Amino acid sequence: MKNILMLGLAICVIVGSLRIFRSTIKDWTEDKQADGELLQSDSAISRAKSWRLRIRRTDARFPEPWIVSEAILPDREHTWEHVDSSAAAGGSKFVHAKGDLEYIRIGDDRYFRGDAMFGHLAAPQWIKLIPRDSALVGTYSAYKLHLTNPRTVDGRNWWIGNTLWDLYHGHGRQMRPGGIKTYPDHACREWILTYTNKETRQVKHDTLCIGVSDHLPYHLTLSEGYAEATYEWNPSVSIEVPKTVLPRPKGFDPFWPDT
């Protein structure tokens, strides 16, 4: 009887070990599959001539700002943004900003026009930004895929990774393959990204849909499903220096003295 019990225990241990082994192998295989998909997608993006990116908030509890960016790789971009949000202005005071902003970058030259925003005055006509001005437009800078992204703050250079590998490899996320979706007229595989919110410890999910045949990203959800982004690849885009550019007004950015 004792031998039978020992044999049963041994069989349970072996079966449990096999299940753990199979699960480990499955996770390892899917991790490698996800890594390969990200690398293939970045390679496909690097061969693109242009893209158009649309970002919109999907949480119905908040106003719906939006961002549209067009780009000619590697260093031309034109972004429009509608802002409708509040920010703390010291203590318990909140300031609300609502307006439309526009931004052009060609190489290292950057131009802006738009309504008053947090930290700067309105510029109804095009002005040329100085190197240490932040971009002011386009909250999700990292999703401007495969663009050079020069930005200087406080005399220091800050680098923003803008490849799918930068965005999705590691960072405590588990990336697993899902079903086939269509965005728009392109069949793509939706990858499910699972991670834990560091503050609330809640498990969250985002998605990334990558073209089955061309490996280009077409749709993704951001910030725990708070917003969504869609891409068009190789649209006809023209980005030129604005015809009339005014001097940058004094006091445009109150956080920095004019130089």
Image (cartoon, helix red, strand yellow):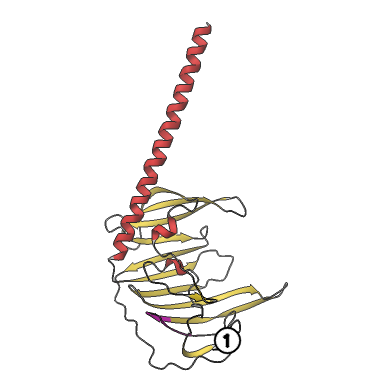
Position of residue 130 relative to residue 246, above or below, is above
Is 136 within the magenta? no
Residue depicted at x 45% and y 78%: 80
Position of residue 22 relative to residue 241, above or below, is above
Position of residue 134 measured from the top left corner of the image (x, y, whole percent): 51, 77
Is 113 within the magenta? yes
Part of the protein shown in magenta: 104-116
Residue depicted at x 36% and y 55%: 38
Farthest-out residue, top: 1
Residue 188 seen in render: no
Q: Which residue is mark 1?
A: 121
Q: 133 or 122, which lies in front?
A: 133
Position of residue 132 measured from the top left corner of the image (x, y, whole percent): 51, 80
Residue 201 seen in render: yes
Position of residue 93 measured from the top left corner of the image (x, y, whole percent): 71, 75
Task: Describe residue 25's horizontal placement relative to residue 122 as left or right.
Answer: left
- What is the quadrant of residue 185 in the picture? bottom left
Residue depicted at x 43% and y 66%: 143
Position of residue 245 relative to residue 42, above or below, is below
Task: Describe residue 171's horizontal placement relative to residue 91 as left or right.
Answer: left
Q: 44 or 228, which lies in front?
A: 44
Farthest-out residue, front: 155
- Number of labels in the image equals 1
Q: What crowding class fits label 1: few (fewer than 14 Cα within 10 Å), some (14-19), or many (20 or more)?
A: some
**What residue type is disc 1 on?**
Leu
Residue depicted at x 56% and y 92%: 250
Tag 1's secondary structure? Answer: loop
From the image, give the main secondary structure of the stretch colored magenta: strand
Position of residue 197 measured from the top left corner of the image (x, y, whole percent): 57, 53
